[in-house]
Image: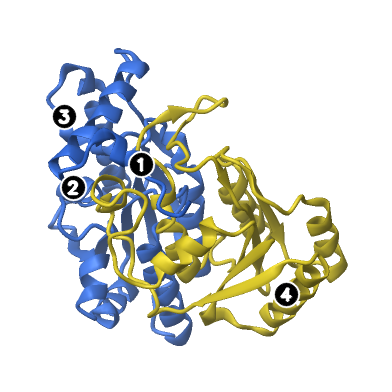
Chain colours: A blue, B yellow
Amino acid sequence: MKNIVLISASPKIKDESVSKKLLEMAGNLIDANAFNKTFIDVRQCISHHQLLEAFETLSKADVIIISFPLYFFCLPGILTRFLQDYYCYYTENKGVRNIVKVYAIINCGFPEPELNLEAVRVIKSFSQHINAEFCFGLLIGAGPMMFAAEDAPFMKKSIQKLNNAFSTIAETLHHEHVTRTDNIYIGLNFTFSRQLFMFFGNRSWVTMARKSGLKKKDLYKQPYC
Amino acid sequence: MKALLISDKEFQTKTYQNLKSLLENFLNTQGLVIKIFEVGTDDLAFCMGCFGCWIKKPGECVINDKMAQINRNVMTSDVVIYLNPIIFGQFSANIKNVIDRYLPNMLPFFEIRPDGSTMHPPRYDTYPKSVIIGYGDMISEDDKQLFIDITKKHRRNIEVIIYDETPETMIEALTKMELGRVDNLL
């Protein structure tokens, strides 16, 4: 049986993580009779000092799927730390497997999935550093909306594309002859106005601030002036 | 004028030492007062993605550590230079952590930029000139290009230099820049 390691790298501590949900969706489509599935939560791993165990698991993987949110157009610091330290572990340990397939699932808050492209290239570079084969990336725009508004009619097309993309990942894993190297882009299908999307998005920040006892003008504070 | 250097304690290689002394000499000759933050693995907590810096304590990170001091110094400097080891074509973990926690200096809202992409608007009217210098040994051409793309492709008003040629090339690039506060074009 092959080993698949699914890495969730959202920096969030309390709130629900979109990256984790996406990873679970991908993981659910992978046949448990063919793959031994292990989930790693990077935040939990670092908080509980379980990095060595995680690296040992990772070193035995045949497939690695990494899911994370875009932070400043590339990987969040917490995932960078994890991969940087794994690379040190990899170079110091000779028992690490060399034939590993790597996939990336990246979501950003902005509607444009293309913004995730450089982060995909970082995962590709990481793969090359550990002698692994990078397969492709799934680039998702407006990630949080995929779940916050998943039942809304205007989301139907995007959700369908998301499910198809996870099926594609599973297919390339289950059937050796099925290969794919092109990235998959999933954004919002703007059947409604983009201005409207931005209006509601902007209003949600004000609503959240009010719940913390702040007024709209407080959001514009300049503490370092 | 004030210049702030931010570097990674974890990668204080010979290349880094040369780069740092080159920069210090250059900035001194330009009459800038230099302050340095060398950031180590245990100095900063990771961003929690809580958005507290937008909706609970606008403009300030809610985590109580050295980052408050770094952000204050960033925003009150004229030039900020990040000395960054290139790892997998992007920032090292320590520098990326500093960048992630720069988020309070922007506003939460969405705005559309001239290239049609979405971005968070600036919080302040002006910002320090940001220069990001990537360094390392045996960095592939692909990783260098990726580092430039990550830094420049989606941002305006940021300069990037790869320190892998002669010191003169870097000084020439720095000399061409106007070192001082810039407009809020993010």
The percent coordinates of residue B114 (x first, y second) are 57, 25
Nearer the observer, disc 2 or disc 1? 1
Q: Which residue is mark 1?
A: A108
Residue A33 in the image: above or below residue B14: above
Question: Given the image, on which type of amino acid does mark 4 rest?
Answer: Leu
Please state the chain letter of the residue tagged with numbered disc 4 in the rendered image: B
Q: Which residue is mark 4?
A: B19
Q: Which residue is mark 2?
A: A21
Q: Residue at x 31, y 52 (%)?
A: B53
C-beta proximity under 8 Å, tags 4 and 2: no
Q: Quadrant of residue A49?
A: bottom left
On the question of residue A168 being in view, the answer is no
Q: Quadrant of residue A207?
A: top left
Question: Given the image, on which type of amino acid does mark 3 rest?
Answer: Glu
Q: A220 or A114, which is in the foreground?
A: A220
Q: Residue at x 74, y 79 (%)?
A: B21
Q: B57 or A117, which is in the foreground?
A: B57
The percent coordinates of residue A147 (x first, y second) are 17, 36
Indicate the quadrant containing the C terminus of chain B: top left, top right, bottom left or bottom right: top right
Residue A150: mark in rendering: 3
Separation (CA) of disc 1 from disc 4: 34 Å
Q: A114 or B1, which is in the foreground?
A: B1
Nearer the observer, disc 4 or disc 3? 4
Question: Given the image, on which type of amino acid does mark 2 rest?
Answer: Lys
Q: Are marks 4 and 3 on the same chain?
A: no
- Look at the numbered disc 2 and give the secondary structure of its residue: helix
Please state the chain letter of the residue tagged with numbered disc 2 in the rendered image: A
- Look at the numbered disc 3 and give the secondary structure of its residue: loop
